[in-house]
């Protein structure tokens, strides 16, 4: 079964820490995405990548960066975690064209 | 710009009732349309899709028809089960685009 795997289901970090969220897909998909999901705000796109080493800002990139050194792995980096980054983070991949996304199970991050 | 509007929830139904969740869209061009489902504590899963006008997507008893004249993609199921309780997201992806636009989500509760 094809998969998008996020490294942690739950994570608790302290304010100011550098946080890495990892996402790996085994489907050879070109495109990968990071969203955050908050009650009442829906899904908001943080960053996406359409090729290795290529990245584009989404709707809310401030406070985040990403890395895609290999096709299968897309990392989200919180440079200095803040409490307003407490959220559910969802990674997704897509082969391109008009295909739907395959999502990971999500990482619930709490910043204290 | 592109946008998706879906009915506000929660929607509460008894088991075996008929389900409709309304979704309308605004798009430049000819988008592909999707329904995703999110079960508690999980990421989103692709439920069904349609890529052109009058196409019907179907999966697990759910159906939606791409109506260009009314710019709609309403989700229907003839007889819901308790296990259908989840949040449902309508979404569009414009031709040649990378970013999927998601609706706000509609929570469905099904009572036994």
Image: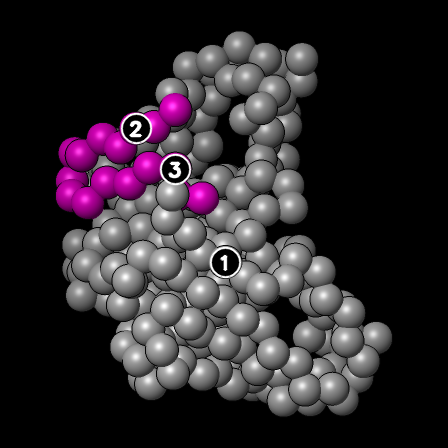
Q: Camera-side residue: A86 or A14?
A: A14
Q: Is residue A98 left or right of residue B91?
A: left
Magenta region includes residue B52: yes
**Disc on res. B58:** 2
Give the letter of the chain under mark 2.
Answer: B
Coordinates of residue A3 in the picture (x, y in percent): 42, 52
Quarter in which the N terminus of chain A is drawn: top left
Q: Which residue is mark 1?
A: A5
Tell me which residue sits at (58%, 57%) in the image: A106
Q: Residues within 10 Å of mark 1 (few under 14, many from 20)?
A: some
Coordinates of residue B83 in the picture (x, y in percent): 58, 24
Coordinates of residue A75 in the picture (x, y in percent): 50, 76
Secondary structure state at the residue bearing disc 1? strand
Q: Quadrant of residue B24?
A: top left
Secondary structure state at the residue bearing disc 2? strand
The residue segment tinted magenta is B45-60
Given contact means CB atoms under 8 Å apart, are the residues at marks 2 and 3 in contact?
Answer: no
Q: CA distance from mark 2 to mark 3?
A: 8 Å
Q: Which residue is mark 3?
A: B47
From this viewpoint, is residue B91 visible? no
Q: Is B34 above or below relative to A43?
A: above
Given contact means CB atoms under 8 Å apart, are the residues at marks 1 and 2 in contact?
Answer: no
């Amino acid at each position: 079964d094809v998969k998008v795997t996020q490294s942690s289901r739950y994570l608790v970090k302290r304010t100011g820490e550098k946080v890495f969220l990892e996402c790996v897909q085994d489907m050879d998909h070109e495109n990968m995405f990071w969203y955050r999901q908050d009650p009442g705000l829906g899904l908001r796109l943080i960053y996406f990548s359409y090729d290795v080493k290529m990245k584009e800002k989404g709707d809310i990139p401030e406070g985040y960066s990403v890395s895609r050194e290999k096709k299968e792995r897309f990392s989200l980096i919180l440079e200095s975690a803040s409490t307003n980054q407490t959220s559910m983070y969802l990674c997704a991949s897509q082969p391109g064209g008009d295909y739907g996304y395959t999502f990971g199970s999500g990482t619930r991050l709490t910043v204290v | 710009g592109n946008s998706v509007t879906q009915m506000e929830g929660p929607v509460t139904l008894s088991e075996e009732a008929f389900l409709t969740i309304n979704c309308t869209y605004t798009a430049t061009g000819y988008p592909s349309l999707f329904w995703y489902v999110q079960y508690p504590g999980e990421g989103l899963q692709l439920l069904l899709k349609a890529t052109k006008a009058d196409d019907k997507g179907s999966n697990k008893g759910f159906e939606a028809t791409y109506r260009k004249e009314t710019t709609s993609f309403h989700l229907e199921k003839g007889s819901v089960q308790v296990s259908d309780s989840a949040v449902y997201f309508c979404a569009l992806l414009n031709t040649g685009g990378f970013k999927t636009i998601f609706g706000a989500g509609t929570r469905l509760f099904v009572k036994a």
